[in-house]
């Protein structure tokens, strides 16, 4: 802007070599977005247009979210973009919507018209889509209130949550109770694994490794009271340590996690590692986590692996250069859910409820562990919170649940495919 005497203020006239001049050149390269552009492209273009340095934009693109979170945001953004196309809206509305636009989108998500499942979607899923749009749009809009927190949007979310709970009788994320962990222990105990012979067909060996992995995932989730995402944070070299007695006999296995979900609140001197948790070896080898895990590590150690993750696929593919690769937290959750289903856990419990069950296992369900030799008495609340790495508020509000009354079936469900 020129002054009264025609001169240009110094701040508005940077030197060609100043960072402001370089930034202006980079901003000029940003092209306007169009409908159909991916989330990252839209994010990059809008931030550059707002004047954010290209290096800062790249840092956010690369490191703002974990890969799994970024994938979830991609799914939500694609649905939002497709809805904008179906409504004949411009990219300007997509990138800076009003509360009415967002509510109409969420209503379409709720009805199932944007899904191939053709059913009424849960309020929990609608909330995730709301968060996706709100998180992304708030990065480049100047409003003091996120669009997802607008009173109109919040009122719609509150309405469908009450509809789910009061009219549709849908169980919400916060469970009122949890399932009996004895179901899983009884199932695994009733299906002991036998190592295949060296002359066995590859399919037999693959099935054995798959069962070993699933049993280790289920027992690990319960005994460590952890999330599926925590299991994806275990490396073989740095996070697994088999303990030996003076006579050389394995007495247990120590596990720790590297950069789990709560990594941002961990002390700096931890270097991203949680403290070690030791699970003792027990006499009943069919449900001994240490024994099963050691066998799994030994068997999969013979396979060509892409990376050092503890839990891997049972088959290799060309995409990973003929190697087995790390299971994502989503696939680990599916393996947990599979064991829960086979063990007879009620269908309304999702995979994450394994963390609730693992906490109950140390207190109300401690008889299961005491009878098998995992511990000698029920734990106190402080011990359980230390194991699960959570605050007292989170523990009491979300995870301190009673075990749902249930009787074990006389006939334990068979292994899939048997």
Image (cartoon, grey):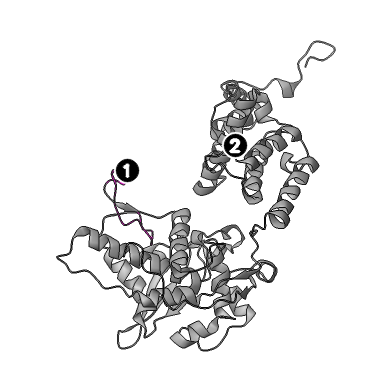
**x and y percentages locating residue 411 in the rendered image:** 41, 76
Label at residue 113: 2
Q: Residue at the location (64% across, 65% down)? A: 175
Q: Residue at the location (61% across, 34% down)? A: 80
Label at residue 144: none
**Mark 1 vs 2, N-terminal side:** 2
Is 417 on the left or on the right of 225, as rendered? left
- Observer-nearest of 259 and 105: 105
- Observer-nearest of 98 and 23: 98
Secondary structure state at the residue bearing disc 1: helix
- Observer-nearest of 321 and 152: 152
Q: Which residues are magenta?
A: 307-321
Is 217 on the left or on the right of 249, as rendered? right
Image quarter in which the N terminus is found: top right
Secondary structure state at the residue bearing disc 2: loop
**x and y percentages locating residue 97 in the rendered image:** 71, 31
Based on the displayed image, in which of its 4 quarters is residue 110 positioned?
Answer: top right
**x and y percentages locating residue 290 in the rendered image:** 38, 76
Label at residue 319: 1
**x and y percentages locating residue 248 in the rendered image:** 30, 84
Compared to residue 261, the image places residue 55 above or below, namely above
């Amino acid at each position: 802007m020129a002054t009264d005497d025609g001169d240009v203020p110094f701040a508005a006239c940077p030197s060609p070599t100043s960072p402001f001049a370089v930034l202006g050149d980079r901003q000029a390269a940003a092209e306007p977005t169009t409908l159909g552009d991916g989330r990252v492209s839209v994010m990059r273009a809008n931030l550059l247009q707002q004047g954010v340095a290209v290096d800062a934009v790249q840092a956010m693109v690369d490191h703002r979210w974990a890969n799994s979170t970024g994938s979830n945001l991609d799914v939500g953004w694609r649905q939002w973009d497709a809805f904008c196309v179906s409504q004949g809206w411009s990219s300007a509305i997509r990138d800076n919507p009003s509360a009415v636009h967002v509510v109409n989108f969420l209503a379409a998500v709720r009805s199932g018209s944007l899904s191939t499942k053709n059913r009424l979607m849960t309020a929990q899923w609608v909330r995730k889509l709301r968060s996706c749009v709100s998180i992304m749009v708030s990065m480049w809009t100047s409003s003091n209130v996120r669009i997802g927190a607008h009173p109109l949007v919040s009122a719609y979310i509150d309405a469908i949550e009450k509809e789910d709970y009061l009219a549709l009788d849908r169980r919400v994320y916060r469970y009122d109770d949890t399932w009996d962990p004895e179901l899983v222990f009884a199932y695994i105990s009733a299906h002991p694994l036998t190592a295949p012979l060296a002359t066995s067909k590859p399919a037999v060996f693959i099935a054995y490794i798959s069962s070993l992995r699933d049993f280790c995932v289920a027992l690990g989730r319960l005994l460590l009271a952890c999330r599926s995402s925590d299991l994806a944070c275990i490396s073989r070299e740095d996070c697994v340590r088999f303990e030996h007695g003076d006579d050389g006999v394995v007495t247990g296995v120590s596990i720790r996690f590297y950069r789990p979900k709560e990594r941002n609140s961990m002390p700096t001197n931890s270097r991203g590692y949680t403290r070690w948790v030791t699970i003792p070896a027990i006499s009943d080898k069919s449900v001994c986590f240490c024994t099963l895990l050691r066998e799994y590590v030994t068997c999969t150690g013979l396979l060509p692996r892409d990376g050092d993750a503890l839990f891997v696929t049972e088959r290799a593919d060309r995409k990973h250069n003929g190697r087995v690769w790390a299971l994502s937290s989503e696939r680990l959750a599916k393996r947990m859910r599979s064991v829960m289903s086979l063990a007879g856990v009620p269908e309304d419990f999702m995979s994450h409820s394994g963390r609730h069950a693992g906490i109950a296992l140390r207190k109300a369900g401690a008889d299961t562990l005491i009878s098998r030799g995992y511990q000698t008495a029920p734990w106190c609340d402080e011990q359980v919170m230390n194991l699960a790495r959570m605050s007292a508020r989170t523990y009491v509000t979300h995870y301190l649940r009673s075990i749902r009354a249930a009787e074990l079936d006389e006939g334990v469900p068979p292994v899939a495919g048997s």
